[in-house]
Image: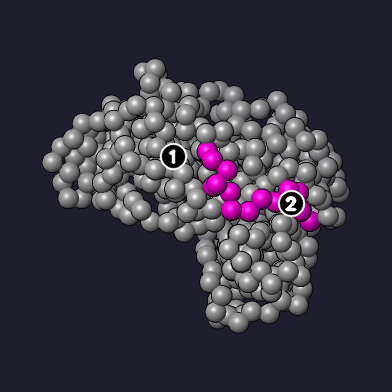
Amino acid sequence: MSTEVDICVVGLGPTGRALAHRAVAAGFRVTAIDPRPERLWPPTFSCWIDELPEWLPRSVIAVRIEAPTVWTAAEHRIERPYCVLSKPGLRDALPLDGATVLAGRATSVSAHEVTLGDGTVVRAGTVFDSRGLPALGRRRAASAHGIFVDAETAAPMVADGEGLLLDWRPENGAGPDEPPSFLYAVPLGDGTVIFEETSLGLRGGMPQHELRRRTLNRLAAHGIRLTGDEPSEAAHYPLDQPPPKRGVAQAVPFGSRGGMMHPCTGYSVADSLALVDTAVEAVRRGADPVAALWPWRARLVYWMRERGLRGLGRLTTDQSIAMFESFFTQNERGQRALLSAHDDYTALGAVLFDTVAHTWPFRWRYDLVGWTNRNRWLDYAFSPPDRVRKG
């Protein structure tokens, strides 16, 4: 079977589904392809509220956190509303009623043609590839292990309406000669709180058993004991997926596959949602979507953030605390330039310079910029998994 449409979207994660939804709203004939198109996505999605596009209803927000907390050398309250997204709410806000939805796996994806495993061929004026990221290998990674804990049990660490974005307090049991990690913990709006020990920037990532051990140590430090039967989730993906090249005769990568994964934070959904209309409008004008999504300013921002990722991946715990302490004392525009803004290259350059310049002791700056210990933690031997207790 063969069909012809204006736009074909391969992969119906949040960003692929949003792209198909907005393309239909713009009047395009759309086919969307995914092996399980109606599944509820496994990961937890969060973002700054001001990152969400105006066309998205507020019903997608499961939990609003007015001023999330960051622990470095001291406690910092970030006066910028943050939210956890409702996965059912987000899916319901992105209906595909006007699109042709095919349940199947794409075996071949090119600039104007997609072939499914059953032999179906979809031809399109533009094909967007939103299937997510390729295999990790030894690339610089985000690794996280999250444990879902009843809100009442979690209250000593995370009360209702509060959230820990980065908790660098020395409570995870990791020694000074071990790769660093921090805790992320937020309520989910369903009576549970996720506690997620996270590592950023290590080549090949940090093993799940090590992250779980550290999470349990943190909880125990606050008197929180688990049964061992609590649900959990795992994350393990590359952070250094580059933006696509312009003028290449291939499907347009979009979302995390298309360079929208933030190299320093691991966030991608909000930025991708915000850029959906840019991509759709480029198709309407007959322009190159890659050029519209990735002007030189955005590419420069990605390049600077990727250099920040390299710095993150070679720091010790003490150095990480000092660096984040410096960053979270910077001005609001500078913080937004690193954490969110797609193309504010001037503010980003300034905040990166100031963060390094105000990290103490002075000698640690050499590690940040890669003059020393460039390959620290490469091939680090973590403890075997049989030493990790259940709860």
Q: What is the residue that sits farthest to the left in this orientation?
A: 1
- Can see residue 310? no
Task: Specify whether 82 is left or right of 241.
Answer: right
| Residue drawn 32% across the image and 49% down it | 34
| Residue drawn 69% across the image and 34% down it | 337
- Can see residue 110? yes
Q: Amino acid at mark 2?
A: Pro
For the residues marked 1 and 2, what is the alpha-carbon distance in whole angstroms?
27 Å
Q: Give coordinates of residue 385: x percent, y percent.
A: 55, 76
> Circle 1 sits on which residue?
18
Task: Specify whether 251 is left or right of 72.
Answer: left
Q: Which residues are magenta?
A: 56-71
* Closest to the observer, 278 or 317: 278
> Circle 2 sits on which residue?
68
Residue 176: quadrant of the picture = bottom right
* Closest to the observer, 184 or 311: 184
* Closest to the observer, 150 or 305: 150
Q: Secondary structure at mark 1?
A: helix
Q: Give coordinates of residue 98: x percent, y percent.
A: 31, 37
The answer to whether 296 is drawn above or below residue 326 in the figure is: above
Question: Who comes first in sequence, dot 1 or dot 2?
Answer: 1
Residue 66 forms part of the magenta stretch? yes
Q: Residues within 10 Å of mark 1 (few under 14, many from 20)?
A: many
Q: Which mark is residue 152?
A: none
Q: Quadrant of the C terminus?
A: bottom right
Residue 185: quadrant of the picture = bottom right
Count the marks.
Answer: 2
Q: Amino acid at mark 1?
A: Ala
Q: Secondary structure at mark 2?
A: loop
Q: Give coordinates of residue 248: x percent, y percent.
A: 36, 27
| Residue drawn 31% across the image and 31% down it | 7
Q: Residues within 10 Å of mark 2 (few under 14, many from 20)?
A: many
